[in-house]
Amino acid sequence: MSPEDPLAPSIRYRWTVLVMLTLVYTFNFIDRQILVILQEPIKADLGLSDAQLGLLSGFSFALVYVTAGIPIAWLADRGNRRNIVAISLGFWSFMTALSGLAQNYGQLLAARIGVGIGEAGGSPPSHSMVSDYFPAKQRGTALSFYSTGIYIGILIGFAAGGWIAETFGWRVAFFLVGVPGIFYALLLVWVVKEPKRGQWDPGGVPAKSTFKATLASLKERPTFWWISVGCAFTAFISYGNGNFMPSFLMRSHGMTLGEVGLALGLISGISGAVGTFLGGFLADKLGNRDIRWYLWIPIIGGLTSMVPAYYTLLGSNKTLVLAAIIPSQILSTLYLGPCIATCHNLVSPGMRAMASAILFFILNMIGLGLGPLTVGLLSDHYATSFGDNNLRYAMLTTLTISIVGVGFLLMGALSLKRDLALRG
């Protein structure tokens, strides 16, 4: 189907759907990242260690998130994706509100596992829907726009969560950010329609692919695996250091919870959204000349972001440290939209939800699962050597490790053209 086809959804409606799905992703990250800004009061109230915080916000969440993501993506490649997203949104929002009732570490862990199960049904079906609403030459931009929901969610979660927690307590913060998502799930069902699969792709509606067939197809395309691991190590730093940045600013620069929430929410939210959208926009523009720009842009962003990122951890001037987060965030977030779009272009339309689920399985197990846990373990380990600077040096170590992600993306760029040719 061509963009001029009268049967195609109107541009206005396609963008309405994209905005609504982006807001779903915003709720996803509000409910996920609210725990990050609340770590210090929760740690004090429940008597937790940094390793426990890393396990709570990282590995335990990631494990259930990626495990549930595969079967949900299998359903999404066969059933109504809109309904899957709406049900998932309602469930994870309910579990977020329930987190505020936790009286100990075990109860809070159980509630966050529930959030992870719900959120597993958000992105893969949404990615698949976006790729069926937008043609290939616009997918980088569309998927990057969708991915800005991460940073809008961080902005709201940090700013609102910090203020609510400081004013009313961390338990109320969980409740107030969780409940609205339940009502938004109903609105999503009312407004959004399930798109026709493969309407912009040669051959039209695809056959339903099995998990085995999807893996067999991806096995022939090493680019997918290079991209997945490259994204994972990029996320390793964004989740690892990102989840502990509020604690770092409070411990090393004496900022209050409310100050950190507002400052970090605005800085990370706006700059992250700008970088995420810019990555897809530039990839779609430059990719018309050479498709490898879809990976060269993430590579350039990953390399250049390291300089301001190191300053945020080593600088002593609080104002300059906060300012350095801006270019670091913009450059380090260029990768997601182009990488998702490239992975979708490597497979048939009937495999896209599963391809996203596999991509996010790898990304979240390494990035979300190991990033915060690594920082927490290193922080506890460094306490005897570095004293009050233990968290700073733990984050520096994690930042250095993450550079390997650039190498994996480079390998993907080298094999991209050959693997796209296999798709035909």
Image (tube, rainbow, N blue to C red):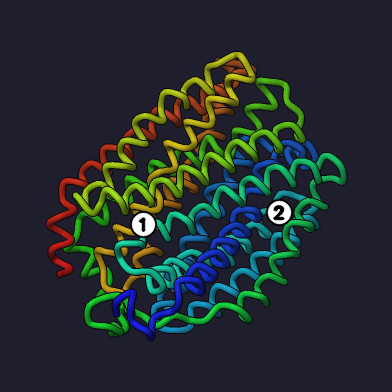
Please state which of residues 4 and 22 is positioned toward the viewer in this rendering: 4
Please state which of residues 405 and 275 is positioned toward the viewer in this rendering: 275
**Residue with the mark numbered 1:** 140
What is the spatial separation of the Cα atoms under label 1 and label 2, in whole angstroms?
37 Å
Q: Which residue shows up at 27% across the image and 83% down it?
A: 204
Is residue 268 visible to us here? yes
What mark, if any, has residue 108 been given in the picture? 2
Quadrant in the picture for residue 149: bottom right
Q: Is residue 364 above or below residue 81?
A: above
> Residue 28: x, y in percent?
59, 59
Q: How many marks?
A: 2
Secondary structure of the residue carrying tag 1 is helix
Neighbor class of circle 2 (other Cα within 10 Å; few <14, some 14-19, many 20+) is: many
> Residue 206: x, y in percent?
28, 82
Q: Which residue shows up at 65% across the image and 40% down it?
A: 265
Q: Is residue 22 above or below residue 247?
A: below
> Residue 29: x, y in percent?
60, 54
Q: Which residue shows up at 72% across the image and 61% down it?
A: 178
Q: Amino acid at mark 1?
A: Gly
Q: Is residue 311 above or below residue 179?
A: above
> Residue 70: x, y in percent?
42, 69
Neighbor class of circle 1 (other Cα within 10 Å; few <14, some 14-19, many 20+) is: many
Please state which of residues 380 and 230 is positioned toward the viewer in this rendering: 230
Q: Which residue shows up at 20% across the image and 50% down it?
A: 289
Numbered disc in front, either 1 or 2: 1
> Given contact means CB atoms under 8 Å apart, are the residues at marks 1 and 2 in contact?
no
Q: Quadrant of the C terminus?
A: bottom left
Is residue 212 visible to us here? no
Quadrant in the picture for residue 252: top right
Judge from the rendering whether residue 60 lies leftward or rightward of residue 416; answer left or right. right
